[in-house]
Image: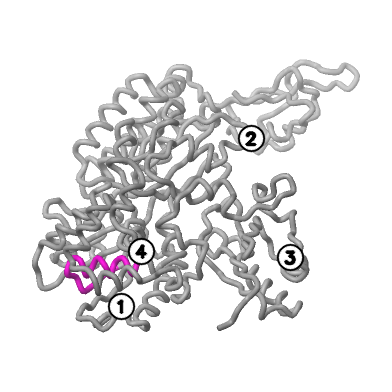
Amino acid sequence: MQYYRAHVLICGGTGCTSGKSLEIKAELEKQLVTYGIENEVKVVMTGCFGLCEAGPIMVVYPEGTFYAHVQVKDVKKIVEEHLFKGRIVKEKLYYEALDEDKVISVNEVEFYAKQKRIALSNCGVIDPENIDEYLAKDGYQALIKVLTDMKPREVIEEIKKSGLRGRGGAGFPTGLKWEFASNYEDDMKYVCCNADEGDPGAFMDRSILEGTPHSVIEAMTIAGYATGSKKGYIYIRAEYPIAVKRLEIAIKQAKDYGLLGNNILDTKFSFDIEIRLGAGAFVCGEETALIESIEGKRGMPRTKPPFPAEKGIWGKPTLINNVETFANIPAIILKGGEWFGSIGTEKSKGTKVFALGGKIKNTGLVEIPMGTTLREVIYGIGGGIPDNKKFKAVQTGGPSGGCLTAEHLDTPIDYDNLVSIGSMMGSGGMIVMDEDTCMVDIARFFLDFTCEESCGKCTPCREGTKRLKEILDKIVAGNGTIEDLDRLENLAGYIKDNALCNLGQTAPNPVISTLKFFRDEYMAHVVDKKCPTSVCKDLLQYTITDKCIGCGSCAKVCPQGCIEPLGKEINSKTKRRQYVIDQNKCIKCGACLEACPPKVKAIIRK
């Protein structure tokens, strides 16, 4: 066995890969050879570390030194100073890792210290393409325990005891779903992993599959044993090439090790997994639309009942859970349902992974116990709002969720609490907004997404969301009326009550919640014909004030040629005049505002 004095972990998630982490790894290996220490230092490409704002990330063990925003040009110095001479390169440390000249390890950084990682426990820790590293972290021990010591019914009871609820959004009790699938008798059953993660800004499932694919494979195999299934499908969108590649590698490795396929671990149980690529339709995240897609049909929801547990893929009993739900299963089996159930709240057990984005300092993935408050996530883990801006709202649950305000910051996060205040857990998107955000525009943005992603099967969703979008377009263009607000509310309620599937039923949520909590902004748009945050272009007006010095900088950059020296004379000797904007020609591009000398600031936007 090869022993190393240091391990260098480099983030190989999608975000850091786009930041050239593969080139960083190649340069690191090259420099290790140059300094003759290639046999002393092991380089590991991991999955996502979670703190995406700091990427590309490099962590050096055993001390856990946390380097952030690493570039290829930084590698030589890190190798020479740290790995060769033993001196930490302080200027590349994550800012929180260097506190009053005392270097702290990655685990002491507040972003990580305040989390509890179960589903993400191996992400950023192991090489996802090396099954031996997963085995070293108790990988497949849960499967061994199940096949050697537990009956299928005992497995289901352990999952029920844990209180785990589906992490895909609906929050249905996982153990109960497994029990339903188990109770239906048929010659063929299926286990399906829903990895069709389509929420804007959400990347929880992708990161789990990129960082610890074996945990999902192990969990699906356990589910197959518990429900009497021999075949599994992982339905994943083709836009996740790194996750797909690592899944393919993991499936092959599991088969080579006798952990997947026929007669697993020399038992009579057989289970195999196949990957199916989706084309990126948001509606295919709905389980029956996903089934249609797997069968080669257009992804459109089916009427329920029957539910997939009774008639799913090709009419056979089918168990469907999402990636994060499966990622919790091995830990539950090894540590027990009571252990998992001791975490979280009475009705929402365990932890939840959120993709934290928007106007927040620490963007990335966080895994927290259920019951943690929004304030703790946004200000404790997330680091607060950049540039000392005021917090305005947070949207949970992706495009189908609702926007919550500062009065909800101390709300414990769980399924029931979020629904009671007009939002939802969803798959785990959490978008933070500051004082510069227009809530009418936000509602329109998410509604535009759901309009595009509607499958068109039912009229309330197909036509209703378009009508909502048209009314919002009218409002942000300055043509809205108070009556339009009533139409928005009535139509949103109708769609919510009559759409076929959850996509349509939840599509109006951003409109409903913003109307409820930010009605004053809607009133400003329809009554005053102004956007309070100066976001809606059609309601903006650029004006040149008496501070104008007649330099003409604004006129030079105006693409419409609508700025001319037509105002009062500023200087009788130079004959300079104050410039004026022709509002009929102005396209609200803002070029004049940027061109005006900072010391002058003669142009205002209102």
Residue 330 or residue 419, whichever sits in front: 330
Q: Which numbered marker is on residue 82?
A: 3
Q: Which circle, 1 or 4, is nearer the viewer?
A: 1
Residue behind mark 2: 387
Residue behind mark 1: 260
Dominant secondary structure of the magenta stretch? helix
Residue 322 or residue 140, whichever sits in front: 140
Give the residues drawn in magenta, as a range. 216-233
At label 2, the amino acid type is Asp
Circles 4 and 2 in contact, beta carbons < 8 Å: no
Residue 569 or residue 240, whichever sits in front: 240
Residue 195 vertical position relative to residue 410 in the rendered view, above or below: below
Question: Would you identify the image quadrant in which residue 542 lies?
Answer: top right
In primary-sequence order, the first of circles 3 and 1 is: 3
Instruction: Tell whether position 569 is magenta.
Output: no
In primary-sequence order, the first of circles 1 and 2 is: 1
| Cα separation between marks 3 and 1 | 42 Å
| Cα separation between marks 4 and 3 | 40 Å
In primary-sequence order, the first of circles 1 and 4 is: 4
- Camera sees residue 50: yes
| Cα separation between marks 4 and 2 | 38 Å
